[in-house]
Image (cartoon, rainbow, N blue to C red):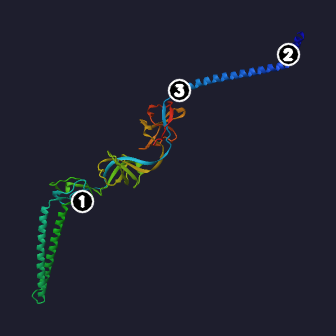
Amino acid sequence: MKTMNYESTKWSRDAIDDVVVDEETRAKRRRRRRIIIAVAVVALLAVVALFMLGGSGEKAAAPNASEGQQLPAVTVIVPGRQDIPAVISATGSLAARRDMPVGIAGEGGQVERVLVEPGQWVRAGQTLAVINRAVQSQEAAQLAAQIEVARADARLAQNQLDRAQSLVARGFVSQADLDQRRATRDAAAARVRVAEANLGATRARIGRLSVRAPTSGLVLSRTVEAGQVVGAGSGALFRIAEGGQMELRARLPQADLARLSVGVPATVTPVGSEQSFQGSVWQVSPIIDPQSRQGEARVLIPYNRELRPGGFAAVRIQSGSTTAPLLPESAVLTDDAGAYVMIVGRNDTVERRGIRIGAVSDRGVVIAEGLSGSERVVESAGAFLNPGERIRPERARRPAR
């Protein structure tokens, strides 16, 4: 048994001796362990630092997010610049292009019949009214009888002259008698012509008793009735629009008038009507009123029963094209200082910008001055914003028309 124990002891000591580590190896192990611990500590510190920085960033971002949510959201648009037809808008009164008054051309009398009504078309020379001509007819009959008497005297004088001429050769009639009979014949013929001229003048006066249309056109008005006594001082009995042509007479500022020329197209819309009529400028006033600094542009319009002289109408006259920003009417504001818009400047702050308005149409408002087109303009609700106020701008989904 002892021998066996010894051997076991010997084996154990040898085993211990085999695993014995010298000092150098132990030092290396300690250094390795310290490096691992140091790396772990650094990693832990890094994680803690990131956590702390992340928490502070979220805390810092939270107020900004909250502040952004508190700012009012406002829709803005960037209008840019567009090619816009230059349109001059104005108002004026409708009238006949050629308003022709028709009155009494002769001596007048009592009206027997009126043959036309306002709104009817007439042709040149058509009888509009007939005046009683009983007295003039009797005068004409009297003159016609006088002509017959003069002609009878002329025939008698001619016969006497012929007989005298046949007796001169025989010596029964002297040359002096022959000359006398020839003068009597000539005087009788002259009296015939005088009587005929008097009858012609009377018939002409009778013809002037009928009131006739001087031209073809549309009867605009009549101021005479049957039984009325009219004369040269009665004024116009009828008014006729030559050819039925109408026009709009628009008064325009001197600057707008200078941009117009004869022939440019125009659109006329009578007040209270949804129908528009196409026409063209046929006359531009050559003078300017020194008081109002305005002139008159006359737009020719073909006849239509909806166009009534004396009515009021709006006109849009095309005068070329221009390139300018175009804004909706909701973006344009006005006050005592004039027209302006609200734009969004740096740091999303609201600024007031004065503008000059150009043409206004269904498409929007043309900005003649004040904007380049690259600004962010408040589309609506600009009246509720104050200059210097911060907002949260949001671009409009569709461009302004």
> Which mark sits nearer the N-terminus, 2 or 1?
2
Q: In the figure, residue 180 lies in which quadrant?
A: bottom left
Camera-side residue: 47 or 352? 47
Q: What residue is shown at x 55% (from left), y 27% (from top)?
A: 65
* 42 relative to 239, above or below: above
Crowding near pointer 1: few (<14 within 10 Å), some, many (20+)?
Answer: many
Circles 3 and 2, Cβ within 8 Å, touching? The answer is no
Element on which disc 2 rests: helix
Whether residue 165 sits left or right of residue 315 in the image: it is: left
- Where 175 falls versus 278 (above or below)? below
Which mark's residue is nearer the viewer, 1 or 3?
A: 3
Give the percent coordinates (x, y) of residue 194.
16, 71
Among numbered discs 1 and 3, the one appearing first in the sequence: 3
Q: Amino acid at mark 1?
A: Ala
Task: From the image, tell me which residue sits under label 1.
Answer: 213
Mark 3 or 2, nearer chain start: 2
Q: CA distance from mark 3 to mark 2?
A: 74 Å
Q: Which residue is mark 3?
A: 67
Camera-near label (3 vs 2) is: 2
Give, as a three-letter code, the residue at label 3.
Glu
Badge 2: how crowded within 10 Å, few (<14), some, or many (20+)?
few
Q: Amino acid at mark 2?
A: Ile
How far across and down, in percent of the image, does residue 114 sit?
18, 56
Q: Is residue 319 above or below residue 13?
A: below
Q: Secondary structure at mark 1?
A: loop
Within 10 angstroms of label 3, few (less than 14), some, or many (20 or more) residues? Answer: few
Which corner quadrant holds the C terminus?
top left
> On the picture, is 161 further left or further right than 369?
left
